[in-house]
Amino acid sequence: MERILIVDDEKDIAELISDILEDEGYETIIANDGTSAINLITDEDFDLILLDVMMPDISGTEVCAKVRDLASCPIIFVTAKTNLTSKLVGFEVGADDYITKPFINEELVARVKAHLRREERTSSTKKKNVITIGEIKLNKESFEVYKNDELITLSTKEFELLRYLMENAGIVLSKDQIYQSVWKNNYGDIGTVAVNIKSLRNKLDKEEKYIKTIWGMGYKFVKAVE
C-alpha cells in the first residue's frame, strides 16, 4: 500500500484529502506544519507528498527545498496561489506538480495516481538495470560493480563476463558458451575465458563463494551465498 504524506495547516482540508485518498486504498499521514513534515520525511519513507505552500511556520517551498535531497518521491504542491511566479518557484525547488485550491476531487486523485504510476515504472526500470547477488551489485546502465558498497574496477571484458554470469546465475555455463556470448569470436581463443575468470576472482571473489568451477562442465555463478 502506497504511503502519502499530506502537509497542510488547514486541518479540515488535510482531513478531506486524507479521506479522498484512503477511499482509493492509500495510506495517509497528516502533518499540519512544515516542521512536523520535515521531521516525518527525515525519519520515514513516503511514496508521494502533497504539500501546501502557505503555512505559518515554514512555507511549503522551504520544506520542499529542505527535503528534496531526502525524498526522491513525487512532491505535489496543493495551494491557493495561482500566479505563474509561484508555480515556477515551486518547480525550481523540486516540486513535480501543482494543484490549485479549490480542487476537483477527481482531478486530485487522477494526478496522484499518474505520479505513482510514473514512479513505479521508473523504479521498475532501475531494478532491471541492477543485479544484486550477495555482496556483489552490478549496474548495467552505469557499468559499475560494487562489493560491500566498494567500487571495483573491471576491464570492459571482465564487466561483460561478470554480467553474463550474473544474468545466468544458478546455471552451469560451458567455456564455449561463455566465449561465444562474451567474446563473440572477435578475438582471442577459448582459453581467455579461464584467464578472465581468474582475474574476476582476484578482484571480487578470492574465496570462490560466487564463481564456482564445475569440473568437466564449466562455471556457475551461485544464486545466493550462505
Image (tube, helix red, strand yellow):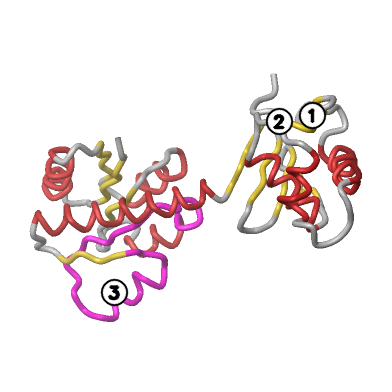
Q: Residue at x 70, y 40 (%)?
A: 165
Q: Amino acid at mark 2?
A: Val
Question: Along the line of sight, which residue is nearer the eye, 220 or 174?
Answer: 174
| Quadrant position of residue 3 | top left
- Compared across the picture, whether 100 is left or right of 133 comes to left
Q: Residue at x 32, y 56 (%)?
A: 57
Q: Nearer the viewer, mark 1 or mark 3?
A: 1
In front: 215, or 133? 215
Amino acid at circle 1: Met
Q: Amino acid at mark 3?
A: Lys
Mark 1 lies on residue: 217
- At mark 1, the secondary structure is loop
Q: Residue at x 84, y 25 (%)?
A: 215
Nearer to us of marks 3 and 2 is 2
Q: Is residue 75 above or below residue 131?
A: below
Mark 3 lies on a secondary structure that is helix
Residue placed under numbered mark 3 in the picture:
87
